[in-house]
Structure formats: structure tokens, C-alpha cells
Amino acid sequence: MTNSADLVLDGLARRYGSTTAVARMDLTVAAGELVALLGPSGCGKTTTLRMVAGFIEPSEGRILLRGKDITTMPAHQRDTGMVFQSYALFPHLSVAENIAFGLKRRGVPKPEIAQRVARMVALLQLQGLEARLPKQLSGGQQQRVAVGRALVINPAVVLLDEPFSNLDALLREGTRIELRRLQTELGLTTLFVTHDQAEAMAISDRIAVMNKGRLEQLGTPREVYERPATRFVASFIGRANIFVSRDGRSEDGIPLDGPEGTLVLRPERVTLDEAPAEGPNAVAGTVDLLSFLGTGTQAVLRLPGGRQLLVEGPASLADRFHTGGPATARWMRDDLVALPAE
Amino acid sequence: MTSLRSPLGWVLRGMAVLGFIYLLGPLLVIVAASFSDTGYLAFPPQGFSLRWYHAALADARYLTGFFVSLRLAAMVAVLSLIIGTAAAVALTRFAFPGSVLLEALFLSPLVLPALVLAVALTLFFSANPIAPPGMTRLVISHLLVGVPMVLRVMLPVLRRVDPAIEEAARNLGASPTKAFFLVTLPVLRPGLIAAAALAFIFSFDEVEMALFLGSVRDAPLTVVLYGAAQMQMDPTVAAVSSLLILLALLLMVAQQMYANR
Ligand SMILES: Nc1ncnc2c1ncn2[C@@H]1O[C@H](COP(=O)(O)OP(=O)(O)O)[C@@H](O)[C@H]1O
Ligand SMILES: [Mg+2]
């Protein structure tokens, strides 16, 4: 893994006056790997991406691309292909000219440019639109031109900044599957910025979860979901009930049979029934909310201590329980996942 | 939408025609009068003659005035474009304290009557003779209106252009200079041309400041015409005006053809 590293961020940091946008970030992206930078708005994702592209100078640290230190290299000499959140298509150039732009700058011979543009147009299903101007395209088509323009130069690393945020929900899912397929097929090393955890889970090899400029956890989608490293990761990726367990009880007095310390209980691990709560890992409460989600039902159980316990179960939950009525929540010992001590 | 066939549609059409007559009527009167075969301005024209055109072109004052105006307007257009665009870039790309106030301040000369500016500038220059009377003073004065005009055009143009396109160009391998010439400039060009044309036409047509601040030697065409119209109201004035109308018409057609290209 280390010797096929395409992109290495080594202690990369950026400060603006007294605010730290990115704090000493260490990250390695392997050849052909897609890593998502995931985190809430303002956590430093764009700043990180723009340092790699060469638009922002790091305050500290180094960037290595295919083993070469590019930390101080001007943007236009770096071999990166960026897809901008706003697409940033050249409004005065046609679709074909937009895609050909990077190839022309690299002095690729004309016949080869035509051939590579045509291939990209076909890959992205833009046939027949080659002569159009960006303003004559739909949002989805513009997005594909932006992707094509960045990929056609076959960059050492592809950088995407929330590329789907301007698409409607349906188009977004289709497009991200399409992008993932293209990325795997072409073996592109990719750094992908998003604040949407479902999107990151769906298409990444690994996810780098960021919070307030810090890298909180780096791991596969399953690792960050099943073994969150911090409280923040646990509640940002999926939904979580969090207990602080001491001497077999949570801070609000629920008897727990599991590890000590901060524990994460995922809503889908909790079951509901009508029997009384006895022993540990069971608690009775009042149903506050039942919402049918299509694939299942989400319930909020209000516990005597005031806590709202999140529960996700089959659609039938909505038939067996009703808002305002009683229910007992249960879970297994293994469902309580301890966070590493902070 | 109101159908154009409805009674209201006919009323609207009628009003549009009246509007055109109102706007273009005076121009037609001037053009018609310039062909009159009389020694005074006559409308409707009597007879047909080109001799006032001969007279206009033979009169050195008009030709000199024309070239003074051309030089003046060209300098005002270029300088307004440079200063106005730079200011517009600063106002749109960098948010700094007071930028909103500065924008309002920049645009304020547009709302002052030219006569007020002319009087104020005359007083200013007599108190501070920083430039000799004539061309230099005229250029400085016209910039007071030309720069805000360019700003007026370029502010919305720059606000519409995605600042990321220049970065996209650099990301794809264009040096900063190349990115400017391959992307930024072509995208801004229609706006720049429109802005320069506006400043040029303003300066070329301006009378008040030219009267107050110009010198006899550097009298722009408008001042020459103004003098002639007061002294001898013969059809030469109409002939010169008609030539100017023709020139404006050609410029407008050229601009439209460029815009619709
Ligand atoms: N040019 C700048 N000047 C000052 N602060 C900035 C600048 N750019 C970004 N920041 C700050 O850095 C932090 C990270 O920003 P950004 O990388 O854009 O976050 P994200 O892309 O994750 O939403 C934010 O708190 C933001 O306010
Ligand atoms: Mg961002």
C-alpha cells in the first residue's frame, strides 16, 4: 500500500489569522483509490482540496504526488484534475472545446485530441451535444462536461469538490454510481469532498472524517460506521445513541451489560416489544414518534430519565405500537460499541 | 400574455409607433433639412442639394473639431475602461470594509447634471491649475463620468462570471497569463466593448464640460457645432449633424453584428 501511494498529505495545515482551517493532516491515497473527505460545512474540506490543487498555500506540511514533492509547485504544473462545485465551465467554449482545453495546454497532437475528446464524450453520454455552449445544457449535462474535462487529461489525482450538490436527489444517485464506475474502470486516484455521509458511504474505498479542521478518523465505510473512533464520528456517520457507562449503568441510570466508557448503540440494533423490561440492556419508555420510511420504521422512545432513544425497525413497528403508548427497547451485549478512550 | 390582436394589443402597437416617431422625428427633421436647397434651415426642405455637405467638409473647423472629439473620446474610453474595470474587479472580487459605500460613491457622478460638474470643475481648475486648459482638463473631466459608466456596465458582468473559471483553466495547465487571455478576457470582452462604447459616445457627444473647460484650439466638434448653431443657422450644421447620425448608426450596426455573431 505504501509504495503504491499516489497522493500523500504530510502534516498539512492551513491557518487564516488565528483560525485553523486545516490542522496537521496526514492522509495517504493509494493508486486507483477513492477517498472521501467527509465532514460538516466549514470543517476544512475545500481548503484541503485547494491546497492539493495549488490554489491555496499550506501554512505547514508537504504534499507528495506520485512521490514528487509538489508543495510549492504552481497550480498549472501540477498533474491534478479538479471538478468544481460550480462546475466552472468556460462559458464561451463549446462542450468539445471545454473538454479539449487541458489536452491543448499539454500540446497533445490534434488528431489525438479529437480522438480522446470523442471517447470522453461517449463515456459520459454527451453525444450530439459537442457543439453546444454550457448555457445550452441541463445541470446534469454540465456536471458531466465538468467531469469529462478533468478526467480526459488522465491526471495523477482527480479532485472533486461536492460535485453532486447542485443536482436533484434522483439524478445525484445515478450520477454518483456512474462516477464510481468510471473511476474504477479508469483506475483513477481520487480525492472526493462531500458533507453527505450517505454519498461518502456509497462510493468511497475509504472515508476521512473531518471535524473543525481535524482528521478524526480514516477508514473504510464499514470501519467508520461500525468502529467509530470518536463521539463526533459516531453521530455524524449514521445515527447513534451514546451512553457513558460506569459500573454497569449509563449516566441516566439505564442498566448496561457491556464495556465501560463511552458506548455507541446504533438505532437498527434496538428492538421493541411489549414485555416488561428486566435485567440489563432493556429499558421501558413511551413512544414519542413513529415515522414510516418505506424501507422500515423509525421510532423515538422517550425514557424516564428524559433521553430520546432512536430505534429503527421493520415497517410492522408502525402497526404494533402507537404514539403515546408504552414500549420496551432491548439490545444485545455486542451491539454496544465502545469508543476508544479520548 | 396579452394577444397582439386584442384591442389592447393595437393600443400598445400604436403607442410603440408614436414612441418611435417621438424619438426619431427630430433626427429625421435634421437629416431632411440638411438636403434643403435654401440658405437657411428649412423644414420641410425645399429642393434637393448636397452643397451643405460640400460646405461642411470644406470647413476646416468642423474637420478639426471632429478629430479633436475623436482623440478626446478615444482617450476617455481607454482610460475609463482601465480605471473602471480595475475598480469593478476590486469591488466584486475582494470584500473589504466600506466596499458598498465606495461603490455608491463611484457611481454618484452619474446622477449629477453635466452642467453642475462643468461649473464645479471650472472652479476647481481655476483654484488648482494642475492641468493646462484644453485637452488634458477635458480628459480628466470626462473621466468623472466615463469611469462610473464603465463601472455600471462591468459590475454586473463581473458578478455574473464564475471566479472559478480562471482556476479551472490553471488546473488544466494554463499559466496565470494564459488563463487570463484564454478564459477571462474572452468572457469579459462583450462587456468591455459595450462599456468602452458607452464612455466613447458620452465623451464624443458631451457639450457642457467641453464648453466650460476646453480651449479654442482644442474645441471638440460639439463645441464647434454649438457655436455655429448660435452664429449662422445655415444647413451646414444640419449636414454635420446628419454625418454624425450616420456614424452613430454604423457603429450601432457594427456592435449589434458583433453581439449576434
Ligand atoms: N480565505 C479565507 N479566509 C479566512 N477564513 C477562511 C478562508 N477560507 C476558508 N476559511 C475558513 O476555514 C474553514 C474551512 O473552510 P472550508 O475549507 O471552505 O470548509 P468546507 O469546505 O469543509 O465547508 C472555515 O471556518 C472557513 O471560514
Ligand atoms: Mg466546501
Image (cartoon, grey):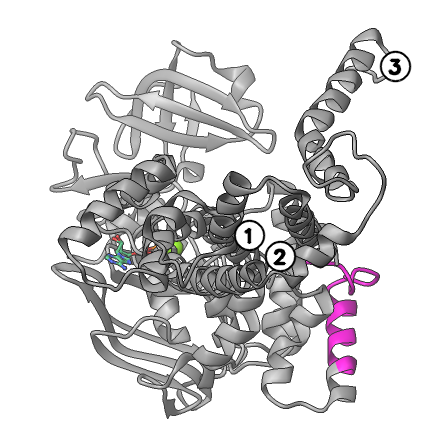
Highlighted range, magenta: A114-133
Q: Nearer the viewer, mark 3 or mark 2?
A: 3
Residue drawn 24% across and 42% down? B120
The answer to whether residue B166 is above or below residue B100 is: below
The answer to whether residue A21 is above or below residue A28 is: above
Describe residue A21's horizontal placement relative to residue B1 as left or right.
Answer: left
Question: Is residue B213 on the magenta stretch?
Answer: no
Q: Are marks 1 and 2 in contact (CB under 8 Å)?
A: yes
**Chain label for disc 3:** B
Instruction: Please tell me which residue lies in front, B106 or B100.
Output: B106
**Chain label for disc 2:** A
Q: Find residue B44 and report its horizontal and vertical position in percent.
A: 78, 29
Residue B172 seen in render: yes
Element at label 1: loop
For the residues labelled 3 and 2, the Cα–Cα distance comes to 44 Å
Element at label 2: helix
Residue drawn 38% across and 16% down? A287
Describe residue A338's horizontal placement relative to residue B209 as left or right.
Answer: left
Q: Find residue A292 and report its horizontal and vertical position in percent.
A: 54, 24
User: The N terminus of chain B appears in which quarter of the rendering?
Assistant: top right
**Chain label for disc 1:** A
Sequence-first disc among 1 and 2:
2
Q: Mark 1 points at which residue?
A: A164
Q: Name the residue under label 2.
A: A143
Q: Find residue A8 and report its horizontal and vertical position in percent.
A: 36, 81
Q: In the picture, residue A222 is in which quadrant?
A: bottom left
Residue drawn 47% across and 49% down? B223
Amino acid type, mark 3: Arg
Q: In the picture, residue A5 is in which quadrant?
A: bottom left
Instruction: Please tell me which residue lies in front, A183 or A297.
Output: A183
Q: Mark 3 points at which residue?
A: B5
